[in-house]
Amino acid sequence: MEYNFNAIEQKWQAYWKEHHTYQVKEDESKPKYYVLDMFPYPSGAGLHVGHPLGYIASDIFARYKRLKGFNVLHPMGYDAYGLPAEQYAIQTGQHPAITTDKNIKRYREQLDKIGFSFDWKREVRTCDPEYYKWTQWAFIQMFESYYCYDARQARPISELIAIFEQQGNKDLNIAQTGERSFTAEEWKTQSEKGQQEILMNYRIAYLADTMVNWCPTLGTVLANDEVSEGVSVRGGYPVEQRKMRQWSLRVSAYAQRLLDGLDAVDWTDSLKETQKNWIGRSEGAELNFKITNYELRITNENPELTVFTTRADTIFGVTFMVLAPESEYVSQVVTAEQKAEVDTYLGSVKRRTERERIADRKVTGVFSGSYAINPVNGKEIPIWISDYVLAGYGTGAIMAVPAHDSRDYAFAKHFNLPIIPLIEGADVSEESFDAKEGILINSGFLSGLTVKEAIAKAKTYITENGLGQVKVNYRLRDAIFSRQRYWGEPFPVYYKGGMPYTVDIKDLPIELPEVDKFLPTETGEPPLGRAKDWVYKA
């Protein structure tokens, strides 16, 4: 007997649709189970092989849980906003609203034919105003909040304003950008714009100038995963590092909570270790190096470079300092004699992403012309600029200890800089020496101590002598949100006096307006700027 696949599939698919077989009903007698797939981007004329590969596996699991007596919620949706969907529309010469709707219909047809057990009554489209009303609501909550480390939670920004009016920002253990201090009187004398600029340093959702991967052709900021060898993965267009005004979320404030929370989740040890490395907690110290031979453009009377190190015991082995090319100090420390050479170097590293800079072991760099003073022995050390230092981690400046760090060692060898071994018996003639254990030498008051003893004594010396402070750092960065493209939910903000304010929640959703031209711009000016009549009345 021949098995008629088409007839049988059509019969049962029609039955499932007519009887709402997979529509979830409330049933408190059964334990709940939630199975959610990663929504597909409707950015093509149909599904690709990777879609069913994952969806079949999760569907098998959802069916298994139903058979085990669980009330299973297994919905599906479409990640319909964003770069992939808009780029497909541009390539096909259509408006993204048209291509997205057309692609979703085709995706749904294909998903139904495969026979998945999705609850389509709960379908989500991220371009639906009824959906992004709530992402806009969430953004407003974050904009109107700051993070308190003592409470280990977000608090209303109105509470922070009340604190500023009473005591300024003295002795507050809260997440912030920069370290500006002010009194209550100084806060009260600020204009409204001045106060809003200060608050922007504390908001969980905030605006800041940030180094990003900018693709002029695509007209948008790209994540590191979207860039390879200086070009965009999608289209192969040139990408460069550029400082741009961006919205960010202060997720770094939650770093310790995220670490602590790993104990409460049912994950494998290997996955937890991956998360720990991603969050990247480091205990160490910040040290201040005074700058000499500097340009007068620095406003600070006693300009200093602040560096973070987990190995304060190696301070006597510092023979040079290195700034990230994006560091704000670069323009300040470069001398007139070195400016042309530095400018050439900065131009050459502009198209390299942070990931590529980390992976590439090729040594490059340029001397700034200025020097710093080692705070423990008073020796003058040169300040270099190199792309192996990243602006986003620590302070964007490092104290280089070439005898005991492989990248510092390669740099010192390449540019013929001094290498001072700090561990008894260390041979640094061919490579750096792992200094995790041993007895210190060439280290002044730390000589003769074990590494563990020297780290503790160095931290004490640094704090007691006002040379810096003990500190915990995290690799976790704040999340950047870009909006240089048209096809995405608008930020629920309006501008007054050059500062952003959130719209009233009752006015949500703020819907995406129609514009004559939605193509991105090479300068980064948002296409929404063309919507001349799109005005919010506060």
Image (spheres, grey):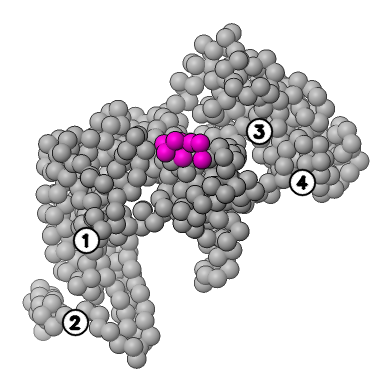
Residue under circle 1?
A: 130
Amino acid type for the residue under numbered disc 1: Glu
Residue under circle 3?
A: 306
**Residue that sits furthest to the top in the current view:** 337
Task: Pinpoint residue 245: horizontal percent, then vertical percent.
Answer: 39, 35
Question: The residue tagged with tag 2: helix, strand or loop?
Answer: loop
Quarter of the view holding residue 228:
top left
Q: Residue at x 32, y 57 (%)?
A: 137
Is residue 53 or residue 24 the one in the foreground? Answer: 24
**Start and end of the magenta stretch?**
188-195
Please tell me the numbered disc located at residue 392.
none
Mark 2 vs mark 3, CA separation in Å? 63 Å
Residue under circle 4?
A: 436
Q: Earlier in the sequence, mark 2 or mark 3?
A: 2
Whether tag 2 and tag 1 are in contact, CB under 8 A, the answer is no
Q: Along the horizontal axis of the image, is 429 left or right of 150?
A: right
Amino acid type for the residue under numbered disc 3: Thr
Mark nearest the camera among 2 and 3 is 3
Mark nearest the camera among 3 and 4 is 3
Is residue 503 or residue 130 the one in the foreground? Answer: 503
Q: Is residue 449 above or below residue 390?
A: below
Q: Earlier in the sequence, mark 2 or mark 1?
A: 2
Residue under circle 2?
A: 21
Amino acid type for the residue under numbered disc 2: Thr
Residue 208 visible to the viewer: no
Quarter of the view holding residue 469:
top right
Question: Badge 1: few (under 14), some or many (20 or more) residues near its Cα, within 10 Å?
Answer: some
Is residue 135 or residue 87 the one in the foreground? Answer: 135
Q: Main secondary structure of the magenta part?
A: helix
